[in-house]
Amino acid sequence: MEVRVQNLRKEFGRFPALHDVSLDIRSSELIALLGPSGSGKTTLLRLIAGLETPTEGRIFFGEDDASRKSVQQRNIGFVFQHYALFRHMTVLENISFGLRVRSASRRPPRDEIRRRALELLELVQLNGLEKRYPAQLSGGQRQRVALARAMAVEPNVLLLDEPFGALDAQVRKDLRKWLREIHDRTGHTTVFVTHDQEEALELADRVVVLNKGAIEQVGTPDEIYDTPNSPFVYGFIGQSNRIKVRIASGEIWFDDKPLGLSAPHEPEGEAHLYFRPHDIELCDGGAIAGLLAASRRVAGTRHLEIDIGSGHESIEIELPPNKADALDRNRVAFRPTRWKLFRNGS
């Protein structure tokens, strides 16, 4: 099921939570809504679900205008962060609930409901636990039950609001891989909200980055990480450094020294140079240089904090431990190998 959001605006009182948001979600796509708190990602999800009504704009499910339809009419599967399971019901009863409460004309026979629920239990790798109650399950198992319950109604669209936010890091990592496998097997059009960049980049076919109620960028994980289109996206996705530079005669200058970086099509004047900590090379001259202020081991790399002088923020670079340990602590010189210029560095 394709979902099309067209010029959507949502206000709570006089507060604009979303303004002029348009987005096309492809059928069978797994898409992430990513952004900081207050960016509008959960509001957008709730508008797609029908839990909120837009102030302006329309939402289409396929060719059907669903803007004023209820959650039930849209046939949405919704998974919340805190499971929202019925504590007095068994696992099997929880999964079956959405089918059992349908009107008589749409309700499958009892045997069919049970068969479908047991199939989903197997799909989410919880077969044998159908008689247990939510209190007897781990957090990860409860979230699997919540997802099975959402899929039981064969939804047009599956929506997940911070689905792994209440779980510890290792369980989250395991469930991310599992959710991707489930999606690839079932083909549901799926939209999930997260503030976890790693989760969005690992799971999604495309990532929608929101900021202050507007979409900053939409793209594949590679596009979002490698070619961010704004200072906000560059700073929000992954780690990045920013230094103030000057463009003159097609060259990039830092502190009145050329960096050996060419920018032939850039207009002259001040700009901000953005680069990732790992996108650097060590060198002797014509580079950014400073004192090694701190060093810490992070998995297979060493993260180094470089003090590049007064008036500048410290720079963080990443190196293999053997290269980092061989550095002269009094002077570290490096040059970005992959970078982007922005005129507005805010």
Image (cartoon, rainbow, N blue to C red):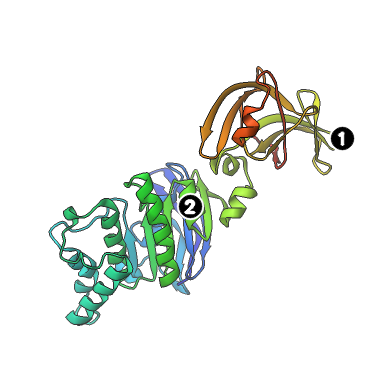
Closer to the eye: label 2 or 1:
2
> How busy is the neighbourhood of tag 1: few (under 14 within 10 Å), some, or many (20 plus)?
some
Q: Nearer the viewer, residue 321 or 140?
A: 321
Residue 6: x and y in percent read: 51, 62
320 versus 188 height, above or below? above
188 versus 209 height, above or below? below
User: What is the secondary structure assignment of the residue under circle 2?
Assistant: helix
In the image, what residue occupies the spot 48% across and 52% down? 200
- Decide if residue 246 is on the left or right side of residue 71: right
Q: To which residue does mark 1 refer?
A: 249
Amino acid found under the numbered disc labelled 2? Ala
Q: To which residue does mark 2 refer?
A: 200
- Decide if residue 300 is on the left or right side of residue 339: left
Task: Single out the residue that lies furthest toward the left.
Answer: 88
Residue 254: x and y in percent read: 75, 27
In the image, what residue occupies the spot 52% across and 50% down? 209
Which labelled disc corresponds to residue 226? none
User: What is the secondary structure assignment of the residue under circle 1?
Assistant: loop
Location of the C terminus (image quadrant): top right
